[in-house]
Image (cartoon, rainbow, N blue to C red):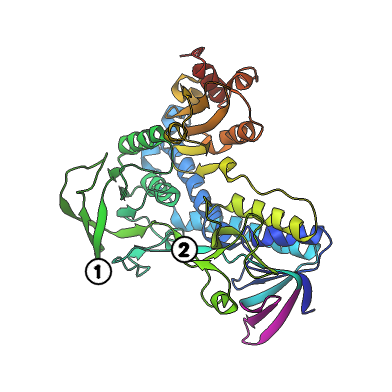
Amino acid sequence: MANEYDVVVIGAGTGGYVAAIRAAQLGLTVAVVERQRALGGTCLIWGCIPTKALLEHAHALKVAQGAKEWGLTGIDGAAVSIDMPAVHARKDKMVSGLTGGIEMLFKKNKIDWIKGSARLIGPHGVEVTLHDGGKQALTAKKDLVVATGSAPRSVPGIEADRKRIIFSDEAIHLPYVPKSIGIMGSGAVGVEFASIFKSYGSEVTVIELLPRLVPGEDEAVSAELERTFKKRGIKVLTGSTVTSATTGAKGVDIEVDTAGPSTGSGQGKSQTLAFDLLLVATGRGPVTEGLGAEALGLKMDRGYVVVDSMFRTNVPGISAIGDVITMGGPHYQLAHVSSMEGIVLAERIAGQAVQPINYDHVPRCTYSDPEIGSVGLTEAQAREQGHDVRIGTFPFRALARARMAGETDGFVKIVAEKKYDEVLGVHIIGPRATELVAEAVMALRMEVTVEELIRTIHAHPTMSEAVGEAAHAAHGAAIHI
């Protein structure tokens, strides 16, 4: 195995492995250093794929429990429950199949996988501590790429023992359904697991510091998610802070301060809550420990590697992509963002003409029940930026396909500006929202007007009709409401 390559990538997550494959396609020699026992990183092994598999099982359970309504005979819906060992077996089979697929792609593209932990030893050098304890030095003639990703992080005063107080890494492998679970944080991870555990039969409480659920979304989306969560029996405490968490033989006791602004509890008091488990879903931090970044002189910000719009660090010959980077502006810790960064970076290293990514056009997907898909400006952001805003909203309950599916919660909301009729943002909560948002992403990228969306024929009966109907509504001409 060679020790000199054109490109050496540290980390085989959705940014690292995609960068490696694209670089190899462009004729560069590539090695990837990865210390986990499989390729794919957080998304494939710990995040996107296993959690969405658990959500698909939740959807199947929902259908089975409603067998009578669906006209399914031979199924006692009331007696249907979840078999966690079977669920995990299917989930793990999917994950292993996908990680094995990446390994095959590495072989196809002649990418060397160096199994171990990397430490930067120069602008073109990496020392790898191999799994067998040995050392291997690698040289990157063109570029070293740091793609080490992120890991769950807690908040001050809350110590995760990974048994009773857990992160998402433990939640995806729970061998049982807890009777009760508290979830700190209502970002994508928090509300997805709230949906999963409620569907499986747990009593779920979501605790959010800010005044509303999914605080990065449009306010109307937050309100609709809270409404549907409460309808499902999920307790919501917004404007609330977990001040302490104590574990015992039977579970976790937490103190919650609800004195802050809240659209949920709003009682202005402290209370003690008890759960079987507490899931900490308060965000993720960069993985750079042991990398040697500071010693090499890489510019860092709170543990993140600082890069420019083309992912160059301050040290020539070293680039970085994915969850581990910061560039002074909005940067989403999302798998599809990391992958696009990997492609752009590989093409830049290979000498192709590339353009910076427009992060205003990143689709944001949350796989809760109901789903959320959004892109562009919220209504509040558009008004703050001085736009003369027009809004169009269409509810899924008025859609034939949604009624067929029995999924009528939610809506499509289009945020546009009046003068040029340009679509500024699209916010969807409801069935297939994470799929429907793709049309909205293209609309923003192509600077589409509301009129053009109106004149775009949407097939009937489909969920996508809601996008076209929302465009009609933005012009005060909704057809079916």
Left or right, 237 with reference to 446: left
Q: Secondary structure at mark 1?
A: loop
**Hey, which residue is sitting farthest right in the picture?**
27
Q: Which mark is residue 249?
A: 1
Rendered location of residue 223, percent (x, y): 35, 34
Tag 1 or tag 2, which sits nearer the N-term? 1
Can the viewer see residue 227? Answer: yes
Majority SS type along the magenta span: strand
Q: Which residue is mark 2?
A: 285
Quadrant of the rendered image containing residue 64: top left
282 and 55: which is toward the camera: 282
Quarter of the image where the N terminus is located:
bottom right
Viewer-closest of 255 and 392: 392
Dividing the picture into quarters, in which one does residue 247 lie? bottom left
Q: Going 46% across and 31% down the picture, which residue do you hit?
A: 386
Disc sitting over residue 370 in the figure: none
Residue at image location 74% in from the left, 50% down from the top: 354
Residue span colored magenta: 119-140
Secondary structure, mark 2, is strand
Question: CA gap, disc 2 to disc 1?
Answer: 30 Å
Q: Is any part of residue 461 visible from this angle?
A: no
Q: Are marks 2 and 1 in contact (CB under 8 Å)?
A: no
Instruction: Determine the residue located farthest toward the front in the rendered image.
Output: 386
Residue 138 is a magenta residue: yes
Pointer 2: residues within 10 angstroms few (<14), some, or many (20+)?
some
Residue at 53 percent across and 54 percent down: it is 333
Residue 385 position in % (x across, y down): 47, 35
Q: Position of residue 196 (x, y in %)?
A: 42, 48
